[in-house]
Image (spheres, coloured by chain):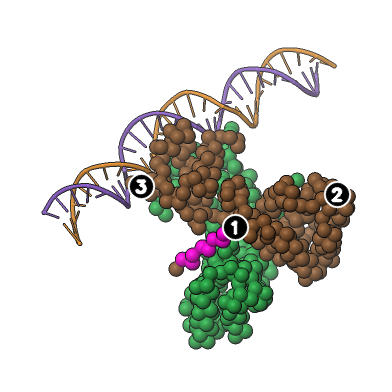
Chain colours: A brown, B green, C purple, D orange
DNA sequence: TGACACCGATGTGTGCAGACATCAAAACTC
DNA sequence: GAGTTTTGATGTCTGCACACATCGGTGTCA
């Protein structure tokens, strides 16, 4: 069902808005969109309604469908993130996600040490050991898979559904990092040990150690990635009063 | 346009799903919804599309409109958060937001110290001083207003649009805390000073001090609020493979 | 006789076309 | 300039054709 007309219309407009092809303030008419995409009124209307709920457009009678500025987009929506990752803003989006991750994961580690169910703790330890092995052997694809699983378990184990929801985005950034050759074949030895430290601290319920080790991982990750996006301009969203 | 039929339909179904009145797995028929809400097909269809994009329902031909379990909801969507805050899950939602905030704000403080534009830094210092005054004088409404502004400026100053987007939710939790009488008339003296410390550290570009002071605020806030939600069950979202 | 694969009937979402209602921007009048 | 009318876009309603997943019946084979 991923190629319904409705879905394709959303994809078409969403991509074009976020890429900047349809700039903020640009006005579209439902009728024009109908013929442009060769679909009926209902398809366009339903698509516009979804884009409206994502903060990408607003509709005004007697005017049309107005494209909204980036400050109005919902930056947490998975679709918006995906579109931004596919646009020129890719670097800025990756940086934002990395910053969010590095803030959240240590907190998730702390919470997981306090709340995670026992089986999850055991699995986390297993995965961390397997990561170390795969890292030593230079098994890149297997390492990536374990890496994703490790961080997913960590976020999920926090028992905070917002943290857990970041699993998907984290997986995408980790995959992207590997695919784009930003990962060495043999991960840093200390980083491997930190993953084990996080897992074992969580296993024994040591919240502050878990946070500390996770924080080390995140700080290293950030410093590794930061040179990729030093050129990305930052966006300061005004405080509305 | 906040009371269009479309909007009311979304509101009606969204609240009922998140409140649990329409449980996961429950199946609705578009036709039934039409007569139940006394609106036409197009209104229902557009509303269902939006709920679908929020992860609240899925549609299957020959079956109907199926309500999805909470693990599929987009926990970052402002509407979903609002509906959860209005439901029995209120406590769990507040806890999740507080945990997210306490993870993000220190990171935002660190980033703001590195990146915030100069005028924003100055305003932050002014607001922190005004907060201290209002706190001493026991001016509760003004303090709340300044508190919201302080934390909004902080998040906005990070230059991370995801952090900045949390302004709305933070404002709502701060307001809720005050309205529900969880805030003393005279805020803790140390907490007032910590706000000033954060602002001044940001003003002079001292990232680690800014983070540290912000961390103190967050840890105190968490320990203050934690007794309110100790009974809330945690939800562990399974890791899909 | 029983198990299993096939296949058509059924019901529901998806997509289409056209009409009228509504309402805010724009044009007009005074 | 203030108030009024016109206009043109979205909002809402309705009837229809189509796609297609599910279910139950039918036929085949062991």
Q: Is residue A68 above or below residue B135?
A: above
Which of the two discs, 3 and 2, sits closer to the camera?
2
Q: Residues within 10 Å of mark 1 (few under 14, many from 20)?
A: few
**Numbered badge on residue A63:** 3
Q: Earlier in the sequence, mark 3 or mark 2?
A: 3
Residue B48: tell me if it is visible: no
Q: CA distance from mark 3 to mark 2?
A: 59 Å
Which of B61/A165 is in front? A165
Q: CA distance from mark 1 to mark 2?
A: 32 Å
- Which residue is denoted by mark 2 in the rendering? A138
Give the residues in magenta: A232-240
Q: Earlier in the sequence, mark 1 or mark 3?
A: 3
| Residue A182 shown in magenta | no
For residue D7, what is the image quadrant?
top left
- Residue B156 lies, in percent from the top left, at 54, 66
Which of B38/B142 is in front? B142
Q: Chain of mark 1?
A: A
Q: Residue furthest bottom?
A: B137
For residue C12, what is the image quadrant?
top right
| Residue A234 shown in magenta | yes
**Dominant secondary structure, magenta:** loop
């Amino acid at each position: 069902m991923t190629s319904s007309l409705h879905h394709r219309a959303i994809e078409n407009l969403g991509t074009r808005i976020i890429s900047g092809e349809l700039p903020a303030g640009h006005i579209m008419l439902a009728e024009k969109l109908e013929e442009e995409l060769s679909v009926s009124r209902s398809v366009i209307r339903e698509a516009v309604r979804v884009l409206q709920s994502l903060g990408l457009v607003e509709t005004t009678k007697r005017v049309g469908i107005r494209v909204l500025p980036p400050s109005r987009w919902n930056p947490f929506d998975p679709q918006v993130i995906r579109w931004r990752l596919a646009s020129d803003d890719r670097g800025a989006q990756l940086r934002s996600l990395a910053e969010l991750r590095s803030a959240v994961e240590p907190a998730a580690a702390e919470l997981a040490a306090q709340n995670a169910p026992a089986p999850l703790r055991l699995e986390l330890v297993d995965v961390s050991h397997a990561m170390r092995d795969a890292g030593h052997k230079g098994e890149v694809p297997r390492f990536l898979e374990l890496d994703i699983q490790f961080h997913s378990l960590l976020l999920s184990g926090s028992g905070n559904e917002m943290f857990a929801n970041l699993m998907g985005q984290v997986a995408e950034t980790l995959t992207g990092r590997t695919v784009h050759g930003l990962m060495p074949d043999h991960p840093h030895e200390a980083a491997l040990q930190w993953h084990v430290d996080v897992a074992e601290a969580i296993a024994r319920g040591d919240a502050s150690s878990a946070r500390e080790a996770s924080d080390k991982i995140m700080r290293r990750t950030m410093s590794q990635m930061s040179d990729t996006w030093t050129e990305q301009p930052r966006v300061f969203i005004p405080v509305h009063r």
